[in-house]
Amino acid sequence: MTWATIERFSPWIATAMLFLLWWAFVAIFRIESYILPSPIETFVALYQYREPLLKHGLATLTTTLLGFGFAVVFGLLLGILIGSFRLAYSALYPVLIAFNSVPKAALVPIFVIWFGVGTVPAVMTAFMLSFFPVVVNVATGFATIEPELIDVLRSLGATRRDIIVKIGFPRSLPHFFASLKIAITLSFVGSVIAEIVAGNNGIGNVMLIAGSNFNVPLVFAALLVVGLMGIGMYAIFAVFERRFTGWSVRGMGGIEHATGG
Amino acid sequence: MSFVQISNVDLLYGKQAAADEHDATLALKNTSIDLAQGDFVAVVGPSGCGKSTLLKLISGLIRPTRGEVRVGGETVVKPLKIVGMAFQNSTLLPWRNIRDNVLLPLEIVEPYRSQPRGERSKNRDRADELLRTVGLDKFGEKMPWQLSGGMQQRAQLCRALIHEPSILLLDEPFGALDTFTREELWGVLQELWMRRKCTVVLVTHELREAVYLADKVYIMSPRPGQIVTTAKVDLPRPRSLETTYLPAFIDLVHECRHHIKLGTAA
């Protein structure tokens, strides 16, 4: 087995080992399944409740993607604003930090008062949790444009819009995609929290009901579903990232071209 | 007939931010320079003497605190569009291949900017032609990081020239290169200039580079930068590496060096 094959399968091996550890822990200490179910019991529950899990999983996925979508659009706009205008940066950054320090779970009841129980508070929470990394990363991409590069463009008579389009966007793309991978996972956290606190739908709601019935294997099965969806979305953005920002990852057999000038 | 005229310019950095004028940095003091169209001049001096500031003044990126900058008879009040710039660090865009990097100015400067799409292939040919003159044919499709430092600087020169600017401003373009590469690029730059006859202002702290390339060498004092003296270089063109071993060349370099010493002591 070559090193490359090991690297290829390493995520699967690591996951399998984690499940094995979990199983051994439960077996050795004889832990009751209403405290911590074994992975086998969890998989059984996953199969047994596959239909409600699928239905509520899709509901959670929709909620998450909605919140995430808003976060991307809003985060991108705010990030460009903060990254390209010093005044916007000094004015808004402290507010943003304060805002991000607020525990989002505490906001859910307020959203419920405003919008009622259901999907809207979950979308809002997912949005609240996930826009911050997008803003910060896009702003960083824009704020760290080399001054010489701006001089080159300005001395050609470029407008601020030219600089944003020709340099800001492409330069921030790697930062942007990195933030998407963080934002999508946070977005799941947001929607599931909201569903637990005040949902009538979704995986979080399944967990709440299963928990109150001491159906702990189902709780864990639901957690597994969230984890799987998270990995799935992460993988999709990783593919996009490779496609659009390949230039930022150097050395794909290119070193031999670098000859003396 | 002067083309670029800098008259009695002072430049104070951080004037707004500083409480009184003593906290602000005086980068340039009472500086005057006069260039005719097609001149190749070099500006040398110790680090931080305001050489780069001078370039920014000419290009209109900054405005003088006192005095006046005129280009083509008109006072410079905003960034000029007839300028090409190149810097010490490669400022090529890493997400574009070399040809697209060279074509960047044409996406911004009129009339190329609003050209119909059909003209694009003509522009590509021009970029390729320019790349060929600096020995970078076959490299148009490569990404910047695939090129060595010297090759990146060649590409940067092409980008600075593609829109046929009447003024070329070079801020230590060869400063980060090794001696051999640098000397080779002196020849490349001289050839480009002799072909196009644009006005060139080269900022450097390499005296041999200044004397090799320029018709006139301005020597500046340490901060606040002031022009100490001007050396005229009457060596015939095209100059080559052999020129740098001629007594006349060496004398000129010595003379310049002498004035830089005086500047430092003052």
Image (cartoon, coloured by chain):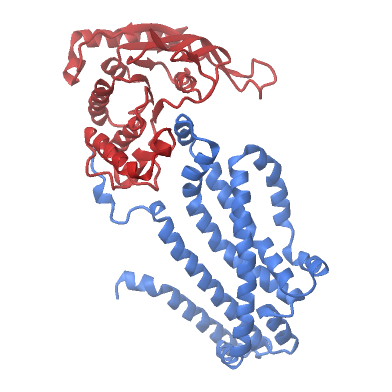
Q: Where residue A160 sits: x, y (%)? A: 54, 37
Please name the residue shown 74% across and 58% down the image.
A102
Q: Where residue B242 sits: x, y (%)? A: 16, 18
A122 over A52 or under it: above or below: above
Q: Colour of chain A?
A: blue
Q: Nearer the viewer, residue A203 or B120?
A: B120
For residue B247, side relative to residue A7 (left or right): left
Q: Where residue B229 sits: x, y (%)? A: 39, 6
Please name the residue shown 47% across and 7% down the image.
B266
For residue A90, side relative to residue B39 (left or right): right
Most extreme residue toward the right, as rendered?
A113
Q: Colour of chain B?
A: red
A203 over A259 or under it: above or below: below
Q: Where residue A195 sits: x, y (%)? A: 71, 75
Please name the residue shown 68% across and 68% down the image.
A123
For residue B119, side relative to residue B16 (left or right): left
A215 over A234 or under it: above or below: below
